[in-house]
Amino acid sequence: MHIITSRAELAQLVTQWHKENERIGVVPTMGALHNGHLTLVNALDGKVSRRIVTIFVNPIQFNNAEDFRLYPRGVDKDAALLADTGKVDVLYAPNENEMYPQGFSTRVLVSGLDGMLCGGDRPGHFDGVATIVTKLLLQTGADVAAFGEKDYQQLCIIRRLAADLNLPVEILPVPTVREADGLALSSRNRRLTTEQRTQAATLPAALTACLGALRAHQPAPPALAQCRATLEQAGFTVHYLELRAESDLHLTQAATPGTRLFVAASLGDIRLIDNMPV
Ligand code: AMP
């Protein structure tokens, strides 16, 4: 596995791969890799002949400087994990100057999908995500790009931007990978104390119970209220808990196939998100 930090070096390799008719797959990440990220790498099996994993903690998608500072980092350990898969050709880990040279002033804004859920209480977050993902898709010349359903709103925004900007890339969605107790794997889980880690299991459990009630045709408002109360009792601050359509994320009260339950909730200063299909 090559580790590349320079855009010029990556461009040279990508040009060569295209000449050789290789199909390129990319997995964009912010590092602190876990089994969820490795599942994205595996999801490219049979779809591509070359794989690039990118690691870049993208400053412009953090609307909280402290969250950016505390975001877990460890490229050496990440590189070892990726090399161990035997599937990754390149780890692309550019620095901030490489991605945002002086004078950088462009933003990719996907309107309509970014005003609710995590876009509601993290203003500018998805512009930052859309901008970096557009740059990474262009830089890697990817034919296929894998994204996790754990960040479902992000997935919808990336699908939209790829279609709208006519990027010749297939966006491959990958179901959420979970711990044995149901907690969605996340780099942020590392910051949970032992006590918070135990409390955190209430999040998937409460969502699962709520989905059970919805599938048993309980009306959405009381089912969601019960779920919120369970989370608050477990010590969470709930930022949102909503039922929305998978297609365009519009709010709905009708728990039908094609809708999803979305939640963001914090334990202390650690914000966790999750979503599950009805
Ligand atoms: P991140 O490094 O957290 O920005 O995530 C990079 C990619 O990994 C995104 O496409 C995420 O949706 C995906 N991802 C993160 N956690 C999981 C998980 N538990 N299951 C599946 N995909 C995940």
Image (tube, rainbow, N blue to C red):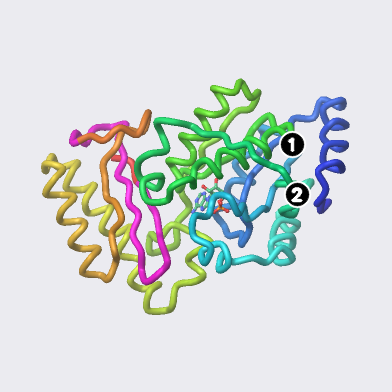
260 in the magenta segment: yes
Q: Is residue 31 above or below residue 111?
A: below
Is residue 12 visible to the viewer in this orientation of the structure? yes
Tell me the residue at 53%/62% (across/down): 65
Q: Which mark is residue 139?
A: 1
The secondary structure that most of the magenta stretch takes on is strand
Q: Is residue 150 left or right of residue 166?
A: left
Label 2 or label 1, whichever comes before in sequence order: 2
Q: Are marks 2 and 1 in contact (CB under 8 Å)?
A: yes
Viewer-proximal residue among 237 and 194: 237
Mark 1: amino acid: Gln
The C terminus, quarter of image: top left
Mark 2: amino acid: Tyr
Residue at numbered disc 2: 92
Indicate yes or no: mark 2 CB to ligand 1 under 8 Å: no
Answer with the quarter of the image where residue 50 lies: top right
